[in-house]
Structure formats: structure tokens, C-alpha cells
Amino acid sequence: VQLAQSGAEVKKPGASVKVSCWASGYPFTTYTIQWVRQAPGQRLEWMGWINTGNGNTKFSQKFQGRVTFTSDTSASTAYMELSSLRSEDTAVYFCARGRGVGAALFDYWGQGTLVTVSS
Amino acid sequence: DIQMTQSPSSLSASVGDRVTITCQASQDISNDLNWYQQKPGKAPKLLIYDAYNLEAGVTSRFSGSGSGTDFSLTISRLLPEDLATYFCQQYHNLPYTFGQGTKLGIK
């Protein structure tokens, strides 16, 4: 099992960023993809998930209205798009495969994508 | 949101030592708790799930215990490769939340 994420991004405040997460080594639609971020020196922060089987999504209220999760089953790839970026969104963004009840066991992780928001 | 508080925030121990890290939840979370290891510059790795179940492929030097609000992660015999930051995560309620991390150094 591997999750491979897209490369680092530098964005200006107010812009959007889209991070991809390509999954391999297992049937893509049988596991949820979770998204977590880690700002510099901060704890991990859960953003939400996408059920890759039916496309259903769940968001942390903190990101409601600003984040979109999508997936392309033909490409075994999940996407996270965050809009209206501000400096506080500077962080490493991780995708992870979710397993178990509530897909809450994050058993495989991507390598992380650094998103820097700076004017 | 459920707050997760780890202690200590950092510690240094010697190879061969037994090390215990604790995690306290702000409310009862039953045994809905996972532990992760994150080495510098790497993604987290799942060590323990449901408070005490060892993830497949993880060395048995790691063990977890606790329920309700108080949990612990124990490394029975510290090795140099255990240098990392360790996080707990609750999944009893949404949003899933993580502890602030315990940075483990080797003396």
C-alpha cells in the first residue's frame, strides 16, 4: 500500500490550492481517504474524509465551506482543495487511508505536501 | 471538541530504558484511542489502535493501555530508532483530535 502526494505549493493569500493523493496496492474504493494537516510546531489537525466508494464527504466544522474533497476512481486518486487561503493555512497536508469504525484508524499515510501561503 | 493532553511534552531516555507516555482526554472516550509515531520529516505511523491493539508489523516493544480518560503508551526497551514524536488520537467523537505530541530523545 502506498499513498503518493503531489509536490509542494506556494500560494498567495486568497488563492486556492489542490493537493492530490494517488493510492496504490489496494482496491481504491474499499477504503476512505482522510485528510490531516500539521502547521509548523503544531499538533496534527483532522480536516475530514471522503468515502471513495460513494463519494460522500465529512468535514471538520473549522474547514466547512472552504474545503472540497473529491476523488477519481479511475485514477485511484483523491483530491483536497482548500480555498480563500490565509497565512495560517501554511502547513504540511497529509492524506491517509482510513480503516475501521469511522475510518478512524489512519493506517497508511502519504508523504505530506507542504503548502506555503505568503504574499 | 475533545481535548487530548499528552505528558510529558518531551523526554530523553537511554537505550534499554522502559518509557511511558500518557494521554488524557477531556471526557470519557471509552477505548477509542490510537497512537502514532512520527519520525523527523516523515509521515506518522500507526502503532496502537483501540487503546491497546498492536498494529500489524509493529514491534511488540510497544504496548498501549487505558480506557475512559487516561491512556498510556509504553516502550519496553528503548532503541535508538525509537527517536520520534508520539501522538495520541481520539475517535470517540468528531472532530477527531490529536494530542500535542511527546518528543522522545535518546541520551
Image (spheres, rainbow, N blue to C red):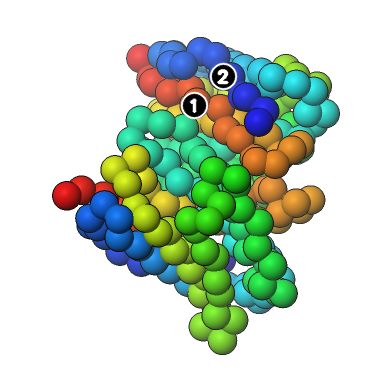
Chain hosting mark 1: B
Closer to the camera, A85 or B56? Answer: A85
Please state which amino acid type lies under the numbered disc 1. Answer: Gly
Q: Which residue bears the numbered disc 1?
A: B101
Question: Residue A46 location in percent, x, y?
Answer: 56, 44
Describe the element under mark 1 as helix, strand or loop: loop
Q: Please tell me which residue is depicted at 80% across the width and 23% down the height of the picture.
A: B28
Query: Mark 1 or mark 2, which has the lower sequence index?
Result: 2
Q: Residue furthest bottom?
A: A74
Q: Which mark is residue B84?
A: none
Q: Which secondary structure lies at badge 2?
A: strand
Kindly report the distance in space between the C-alpha atoms of the residues bearing marks 1 and 2: 6 Å
The chain under label 2 reads: B
Is disc 2 surrounded by few (<14), some (14 to 19) or many (20+) residues within 10 Å? many
Q: Which residue is mark 2?
A: B6
Q: Quadrant of the C terminus of chain B?
A: top left
Position of B83 relative to B43 (above/below): above
Look at the image and tell me in which quarter the N terminus of chain B lies. top right
Tell me the amino acid under the disc marked 2: Gln
